[in-house]
Amino acid sequence: MKKALNADTILNIGFFGGLGLKALNSLVEIIGGFLMTFISHNWLNHCILMIALPELSEDPDDPLMNYLIDFGQTFSSSSQHLVGVYMLLHGITKLVIIILLLERKLWAFPVGVAVFGLFIIFELFSYIHGHSLIMLLIVIFDIVILAMIIWEFQRLKKAQA
């Protein structure tokens, strides 16, 4: 006999699913940050060209591939390392907080809310200056995750009382 989904079950799925997606994103950031920090600028540009040129031979107007090539040509070595360090720190911070939240450490919930709240402020600032649809979607997703963290914290505190 199937059990009907109630609001708590749906919110639990959202909480754990959202944290799982954030954890995967954190791992990608850590790997990307490591690569951006430790690979040479020339090698990065070579990789971009290896990816983009075959696509551009099929469709010379491909906006994504043209953007990648332009990005590689205007992205300086110092910017590459700065982005790499930022991605490493951002990814590691998120992953540590996510692990603590999944372990249900009550003290980690307010810390997570504060850290993710700061990330959202930075993302909003970035969106306002760049008007990137992807950044807007990230902001919306992070706000939903923040609401789920607050909901789970309140639920855990109520269960302890």
Image (cartoon, rainbow, N blue to C red):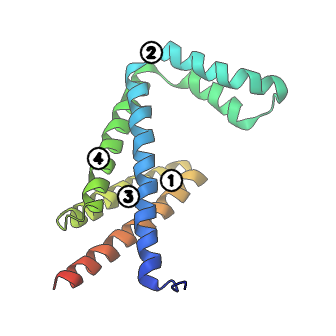
Q: How many marks?
A: 4
147 vs 28, nearest the viewer: 28
The answer to whether residue 83 of the structure is visible from this angle is: yes
| Mark 1, residue position | 127
The C terminus lies in which quarter of the figure? bottom left
The CA distance from mark 4 to mark 1 is: 21 Å
Mark 2, secondary structure of its residue: loop
The CA distance from mark 1 to mark 2 is: 29 Å
The CA distance from mark 2 to mark 3 is: 31 Å
| Mark 3, residue position | 121
The mark lying in front, picked from 2 and 3, is 2
Give amino acid for label 3.
Ile
- Tag 4 and tag 1, C-beta contact below 8 Å: no
| Mark 2, residue position | 40
Which circle marks residue 37 in the picture?
A: none
Question: In the picture shown, does residue 13 fall above or below 96?
Answer: below
| Mark 4, residue position | 93
The CA distance from mark 3 to mark 1 is: 10 Å
